[in-house]
Structure formats: C-alpha cells, structure tokens
C-alpha cells in the first residue's frame, strides 16, 4: 500500500512511523527544509522537501498511484486543497486534519468524509478527566478485526429509522450523534440531515456498511 503524508507535525511524524512499521510504502512531504532533512536521515521512507499544496509536487510523489493520502499540515485550507487535488487524481482514501469546526463543515459540504479533529478529541478527554471520569480509550477496545466507525448519513437514508437500514452481518448500530446529543440505537430514531451514526462492524465489511448507508464512493 502506497501512502502519501503531507505535513511533518507530531501527527504526521507519528503516522509515518506507524505506516513504516506496518510495511507500507510512505512518501512524506514537508515544506520546512531543516525538518525534512532530519526526517530523511532518520526515517525509512521517501521525504520530499516542498510545499504539499502544489500539484507538481504531488505529481512528483506519484499521487495518481497512491492508495491513500493524509493531509495533516497546520493549515486547514491547505489540507482541503490537498484533498481536492487528490480527489481529482482519484486517490482511494483521502484523510484531512481539520482544526477549525467551520472548515470541518466546509470539508463535509465538499464531500469529504474522513476528517480528524485532534483538538476536539483532546479537549473532550481533558474535560472528562477534570470531571473525574476515567475514560477508556477506544483504541483499547478495538481488537482483532473489530472496528467502530462514524458515518454522516446521506440523502438516501434521511427519514428512515435505524431498524429500516440493512447493515451487513456482524454489524450493528450503537447510536447516533445529532448536534451535541447522543441517541442510543435502541430508541430507533428517525434519521435527520447531518446525523452521524455510530456502528460496530468487522474491518472487512466497512465498504459494505458505507454502501448500506448510501455512500457508494467514499473519499
């Protein structure tokens, strides 16, 4: 699997190391010359010192043959731009790091699904600690091929109840997020625009789950 990672911040570097450990072919793009030089000497991957929003640089990284791209620079607009270029090149998986909620909304309207908001995740965890809640990290619960996933619904399933949607075998709804409210699946809510359903499934069935929810070609 060929993965392009744009941005060598803490997330980009850690992800690059993880991908290398998993035997992935990684191309890391970083615009800071000093950082790029240091990483080129310490990481077992291709490091390109350049601006990752430039189409010619992404072409140099062989974007059209990439299986996935992760845009995790410190600039939300740049990450969205990288995503648009990657989508035009028909990259299979496009993952964007977005820090500002208003750009999360923009990216969602542009049709991007895989988005990471580190500050939101961290702030929720810190808030739980302050409140005296010992939160179990989801990573500790994911074993074997089990996967938890959140999917923003499409027009295909608006106004349907969860019970009316046929998920693949060995998959189930846990509940859904509606703005700041979480609704358990056992209440069988009727889906509304912008609802995000939470599902537990098998890693091999993720594509089938997306199709069941009307997402035929996921980015």
Image (spheres, rainbow, N blue to C red):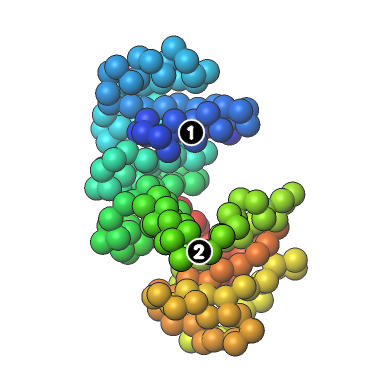
User: Could you say which disc has been placed on residue 75 in the image?
Assistant: none
Disc sitting over residue 132 in the figure: 2
**Which percent across, then down, holds residue 111?**
37, 60
In the rendered image, the vertical position of residue 6 relative to residue 140, given as above or below: above
Name the residue rendered at 48%, 86% in the picture: 159
Left or right: 32 as drawn, with respect to 94: left
Using the numbered discs, state the Cα–Cα distance from disc 1 to disc 2 in whole angstroms.
29 Å
Q: Can residue 20 be seen in this view?
A: yes
Q: Which residue occupies 30% across, 32% down?
A: 52
Q: Residue at x 44, y 12 (%)?
A: 41
Q: How crowded is mark 2: few (under 14 residues within 10 Å), some or many (20 or more)?
A: few
Number of numbered labels in the structure image: 2
Mark toward the viewer: 1 or 2:
2
Of mark 1 and mark 2, the one earlier in the sequence is: 1
Secondary structure type for disc 2: loop
In the picture of the structure, the residue carrying the numbered disc 1 is 14
Q: Position of residue 64 (x, y in %)?
A: 43, 35
x then y, percent, for residue 76: 27, 48
Tell me the SS state at disc 1. Answer: helix
């Amino acid at each position: 699997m060929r993965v392009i990672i744009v941005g060598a911040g803490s997330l980009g570097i850690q992800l690059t190391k993880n991908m290398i450990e998993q035997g992935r072919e990684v191309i890391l793009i970083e615009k800071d010359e000093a950082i790029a030089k240091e990483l080129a000497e310490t990481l077992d991957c291709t490091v390109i010192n350049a601006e990752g929003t430039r189409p010619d640089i992404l072409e140099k990284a062989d974007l059209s043959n990439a299986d996935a791209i992760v845009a995790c620079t410190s600039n939300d607009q740049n990450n969205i731009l990288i995503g648009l270029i990657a989508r035009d090149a028909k990259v299979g998986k496009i993952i964007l790091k977005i820090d500002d909620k208003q750009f999360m909304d923009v990216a969602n309207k542009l049709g991007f699904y895989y988005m990471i908001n580190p500050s939101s995740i961290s702030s929720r965890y810190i808030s739980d600690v302050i409140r005296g809640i010992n939160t179990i990290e989801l990573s500790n619960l994911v074993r074997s091929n089990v996967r938890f996933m959140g999917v923003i619904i499409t027009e295909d399933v608006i106004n349907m109840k969860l019970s009316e949607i046929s998920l693949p075998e060995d998959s189930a709804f846990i509940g859904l997020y509606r703005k700041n409210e979480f609704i358990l699946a056992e209440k069988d809510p009727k889906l509304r625009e912008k609802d995000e359903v939470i599902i537990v499934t098998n890693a091999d069935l993720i594509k089938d789950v997306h199709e069941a929810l009307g997402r035929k070609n996921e980015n």
